[in-house]
Amino acid sequence: MAVDDPGRFAADALADALARRGIRIDGSVRVLGYEDGAPAYLDRSPSLVGQISSPPLTEIVKVINKRSHNFYAEQLLFTLGAVAGSEGSFAGGIDVERRVLTRLGVDTRQIRLEDGSGLSRLNLVTTEMFVRLLAWMDTHQLREQFVASLPVAGRDNGVRRLRDTRAAGRLFAKTGYITSVMALSGYTWTGDGDKVAFSLLGNNWLMPKARARRIIRDLCLEIVRSRRPVGISDELELRP
């Protein structure tokens, strides 16, 4: 689930961890904002009592994509806003996302972004948005690391059902699911050997989830088997 106040969440988690190890804490957890004024103890020189180094962003993205880690996705949105935007918040992170999508040619008036994980039913996105983003990432200097973060057909959760098909090992895509909504977006190679970006979004499914997944699977196989029409010989390219 989304964490509205990461500071309080972290402080409460630390307090709980200390208490479980028999360390007494006097007082309650409080989150101070700039409007509260700096307490006197902040004037003292700080002492380092512990340090944890974050893994690189490429590893964090791999956890998000391979395991559909919603909490990591939400915190990454806050970080995006803090580092590249006006503030570390939903609004700050989403503003950065919209600026990037605008540069990629996405009409942001036709979409609505509400969180980092995609769990909110207020999100409204398009297949064009995903394809433009995927095409851009295919030109990025970290494209290999990005593709490596995506679930692999036939091996990883979400696309494992594609094992023993032509898509196995040659389709790399991220799943998306909430009740009555199913999605899959990523890369694969066609029957002609062309690398393509694709995005499949299904809304308001009234059929059983297993049947919806079979439809997504069958569409993926159609893409993998597809060939250019006779007479079209120009090499296809992924373009941003």
Image (spheres, rainbow, N blue to C red):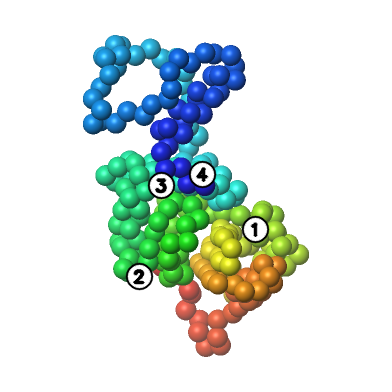
Question: Tag 2 or tag 1, which sits nearer the N-term?
Answer: 2
Give the amino acid at mark 3: Leu
Q: CA distance from mark 3 to mark 2?
A: 21 Å
Q: CA distance from mark 1 to mark 2?
A: 28 Å
The residue identified by callout 4 is: 71
The residue identified by callout 2 is: 110
The residue identified by callout 1 is: 158
Name the quadrant of the C terminus.
bottom left
Crowd band around label 2 with a 10 angstrom C-alpha radius: few (<14), some (14–19), many (20+): few
Q: Secondary structure at mark 1?
A: loop
**Residue under the point 33% across and 50% down:** 91
Percent of width and height locating residue 34: 25, 30
**Residue under the point 60% across and 48% down:** 67
Question: Tag 4 or tag 2, which sits nearer the N-term?
Answer: 4
Crowd band around label 4 with a 10 angstrom C-alpha radius: few (<14), some (14–19), many (20+): some
Question: Tag 3 or tag 4, which sits nearer the N-term?
Answer: 4
Q: Secondary structure at mark 4?
A: helix
Percent of width and height locating residue 126: 44, 69
In the depicted view, which residue is nearer to us: 104 or 115? 115
The residue identified by callout 3 is: 77
In the depicted view, which residue is nearer to us: 136 or 110? 110
**Residue under the point 35% across and 53% down:** 94
Residue that extends furthest to the bottom in the rendered view of this protein: 231
Give the amino acid at mark 2: Gln
CB within 8 Å, label 1 to label 2? no
Question: Tag 3 or tag 1, which sits nearer the N-term?
Answer: 3
Q: Secondary structure at mark 2?
A: helix
Percent of width and height locating residue 48: 41, 15
Give the amino acid at mark 4: Phe
User: Closer to us: mark 4 or mark 1?
Assistant: 4
